Amino acid sequence: MKNGHETIAVVAGGAGFIGSHLVDALLAEGMRVVCIDNFRTGRIENLRHLEREPAFDLIDADIIDAPPAKLMRSARKPGFVFNLACAASPPHYQADPEHTLLTSVMGTHHLLQLAEATGARFVQASTSEIYGDPEIHPQRENYWGHVNPTGPRACYDEGKRAAEALVFDFLRARRGDARVARIFNTYGPRMRADDGRVVSNVITQALAGDDITIYGSGEQTRSFCYVDDLVRGLIALSRHDNSYRGAINLGNPKEIKVLELAGRVVEMTGAQSTIAFRPLPVDDPRRRRPDITLAQRVLKWRPTVPLAVGLARTIAYFAAEAEALAHLPTGRGIRQARQIESRAAARPGG
């Protein structure tokens, strides 16, 4: 859908980690972007560089409360509606579980109504958490999952599952065009240091010289996708025009143990940190790895950024943030992080 000669994209959750990178990528493609965020977990710092960008608009609103008519007036006639609005790390989504669940249900409902009213293509950011603690490995899109519906993670896991149900009912009723991305562990610059995810935890602790906290034995696995790769996948999903309309996994199929990830970060930062083991949280998945066969076939997409390069860029970001917060003028930490990034980029295979 176009307004004049300009394609407009609404990005709910656009001040968040992934959302702000998506906003940048859409602007780089020449779109006008309307960001909707309530700043519960999103950060204005992620958008500060866009203050003078004429093709960018920011709406401070909560999609739980904002009716579609208000969003439509603000966003005019969008061609795309991307829903990335929801706290995504356990400490944040468990802090207000009711709000988390309602964001996925009522918020998705409101944005689907906006897409229907304007003829926009809707893209739902779902999650690998809909698979729960999976009994099938790697996880394929036809796997229904193994989720505890009453546990402390249910507000997020079941909320996202309910959001998917809304999207697919919307499609079956022929009320519009919608797509669902199941996003696996993503990392990169603009992650929050306090989000409780393993990459941000390990990097910030290593840079500070603190003990590295590992929950459980560290033998549990994750598959980490660099944010630039993930954003390319979301845009490819929004653009594809073949007949497939089911959910699509977006993530990196290279699996790594949490303990091995910690060791890599310690080595890259030169930290003297030791490992401090803590009990594994309730319902924490033991293994996580996407089958991306569908993404490769339907979207012609696969991740390309090696873990070593992505980690180095993320370390550089956190080092720069730490220096800025400490008001340190030397730039020594930033220079060190850039040297790490250069070495990682030169290393074959990542």
Image (cartoon, helix red, strand yellow):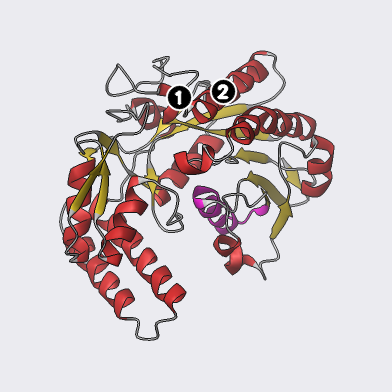
**Label 1 residue SS:** helix
- The amino acid marked with disc number 2 is Glu
Count of numbered circles in the view: 2
| Residue 165 vertical position relative to residue 108 in the rendered view, above or below | above
Quarter of the image for residue 122 reads: top right
Q: In this orientation, does residue 89 appear?
A: no
Give the main secondary structure, helix, strand or loop, of the magenta stretch. helix
Pick the front one: 128 or 248: 128
- 333 in magenta: no
| Residue 321 vertical position relative to residue 35 in the rendered view, above or below | below
Residue 134: percent from left, percent from top:
33, 20
The numbered disc on residue 164 is 2
Residue 164: percent from left, percent from top:
56, 23
Residue stretch rendered in magenta on the structure: 17-34
Residue 233: percent from left, percent from top:
45, 40
Q: Residue at x 19, y 51 (%)?
A: 275
Q: Residue at x 46, y 23 (%)?
A: 151
The numbered disc on residue 130 is 1
- 29 in magenta: yes
- The amino acid marked with disc number 1 is Ile
**Label 2 residue SS:** helix
Q: Residue at x 22, y 65 (%)?
A: 269
Pick the front one: 20 or 55: 20
